[in-house]
Amino acid sequence: MFRNIIKLNRGLSRYYSTAGRRSSNGNKGFSFNSNSVKVGGAIALSALTITGLSTVLLEQEKKEEQVEVNATEEPKKSEKEYKKAMDTDYDIESFKYVIIGGGTAAYYAVDKILENDKEATILIISKERDVPYQRPPLTKNLWQTKDDNVVNTLSFSDWSGKQQNLLYEPESVYGSEILQFVKTRSVIDLHIDEKLVLLNDGKLIRYDKCLIATGGEPRNFKFTSTDKEKITTYRTVEDFKNLYNFIKDGNKHVTILGGGFLGSELTCSLGLNFGEKGIKLAQVFPENGVYANLFPEYLSNYATEEISKIGVDVKTKRLVKDITDNNGRLTVLLDDGSSFDTDHVVVAAGIIPNTDVVKSTTLEIDQVNGGYVVNPELQARTDLFVAGDVASYYDFSLGVRRRVEHHDHARATGELAGNNMSTKTTPNPYTYQPFFWSDLTPGVGFEAVGNTSAKLKTFSVWEKKEGENEEQKYNKGNIYYLNDKNQVVGVLCYGNYGKMDTARRLILKKRVIQDLNELQHAIDFDEHH
Ligand SMILES: Cc1cc2nc3c(=O)[nH]c(=O)nc-3n(C[C@H](O)[C@H](O)[C@H](O)COP(=O)(O)OP(=O)(O)OC[C@H]3O[C@@H](n4cnc5c(N)ncnc54)[C@H](O)[C@@H]3O)c2cc1C
């Protein structure tokens, strides 16, 4: 919850309400037609020009259904406008804080800014239609609800049985003078010296502080079939709604390409919750087993078997060569010469960090990991911050530069960037070690922290209870990942929850492990309360 939004809501004008399309009075706020009305009195640093922005947003409301957002398309008009804006005193909407991207990092940054700065004016610009929401339930909890209306309610039970909504906040929160949200728009350029962002509809916005929190775009491939409805990627709530509506009546064959987090979680959710409705599944990937980049080989093999047990046709060590149209269905051709028919293909092959925001200015891109390079305080330049999946940062405790694509990291970097943007004290460095988790089948779930690359040496400790048979050997375990100096750099707690703080401490100690048996009792198997 935005802890301070209610308190802060000064309730003067409403420029734009994201609830507009649902509620009849959503656009009531656009009542200021006078030219260049400013509300500078209420806002400390920047004079907020209403007219221009309200025009942008009204146009946007009208065009919303037709607009195909294309971040690479630069309108000619905007180029001129852009130059003009930089040459003259041209009146441009200003916000104290402009956030590019409307995902998890953006949400937590805004939360922190609202906490620190009682004079904040914040604009979030997002490619998506939806206000900030959490992505993990898109492959897990949302599929478990028995409510067909889930595509509208977006509500689900969390791990503790508590009812939650996918959206962090209701849409109505984003329509105040303090906090605005522009949907289905992308930032196509950023002029750092002038502190201007250019939107794909040609509009310019000025900022005092800016955060790039643009996440990543799902990787896709070129196939002979170009059927965009049948071959999709999966990242957004729209993707969830489309897939849900496609499979809810059952009796379809769905193919998932990818054996990582997204592909495996989605496969399991569909298999476990829609198998009975006649949803048949194939999962295809080139590795020997699922989570091959994370799990030691024996565990990857075990998890793959568990997925097969729920009725999924898991095709390991195979690459998809092509997908062709076949009388209303698709044919998937594999590199071993075999093929099969399917109704829908979901490509779950990782993401490419969204670094197309800055064209005219140079920001350093990490050539190894991708993403914008930031300093420890998450700054790419003065007053320009980067958080979440798109940030390449130096991890002090691991001694490496990395880019992390996980929820907890997006939350923590968003919060820190928001803090550093809005605090008057010295900015803090990012020293936190983020964790991540995954749930596949009831028997395959874990939390992990640090460097958990399967390329590292691992040492596994499994809980053995009296009377347990061989079948149950992978109930609860801790897997320690060691570097070439024999220091623990990562820990994966399999079925053993609530141990991340202990694991972090172990990594931070950087103790050289002389005898691996020292790790036998490093993390216990007690229930966490
Ligand atoms: C289905 C799914 C399940 C996941 N499950 C887990 C999990 O179980 N555990 C875990 O740790 N992590 C999980 N993750 C990863 C986690 O959700 C991401 O790491 C996190 O969302 C990253 O947050 P972010 O704010 O950096 O980026 P995002 O949440 O991707 O937000 C970026 C936003 O910026 C927008 N944008 C991009 N470019 C522009 C532009 N030029 N102009 C305007 N807007 C732009 C995008 O459209 C998007 O809305 C999952 C991810 C997915 C997709």
Image (spheres, rainbow, N blue to C red):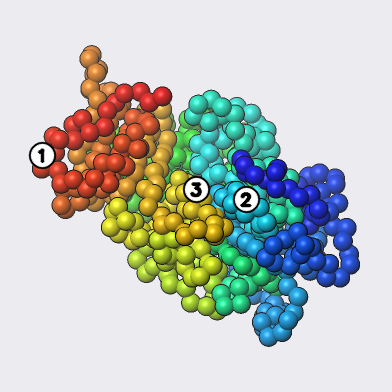
Residue in view at x 44 percent, y 49 percent: 409
Residue in view at x 37 percent, y 31 percent: 497
- Which structural element holds mark 2? helix
Closer to the camera in the image, 60 or 310: 60
Q: Residues within 10 Å of mark 2 (few under 14, many from 20)?
A: many
* Numbered label attached to residue 114: 2
Q: Which residue is mark 3?
A: 411
- Which structural element holds mark 3? helix
Q: Which residue is mark 1?
A: 515
Q: For the view shown, which residue lies furthest in the top direction?
A: 467
Residue 390 visible in rendering: no
**Is the residue 1 above or below the residue 61 in the image?**
above
Q: Position of residue 329 (x, y in %)?
A: 56, 48
Badge count = 3
Residue in view at x 63 percent, y 73 percent: 196
Q: Is residue 274 left or right of residue 175?
A: left
Q: Is residue 352 left or right of residue 463?
A: right
Q: Quarter of the image containing the C terminus?
A: top left
Mark 1 or 2: the one toward you: 2
Which circle's residue, 2 or 3, is located before the other in the chain? 2
- Which structural element holds mark 1? loop
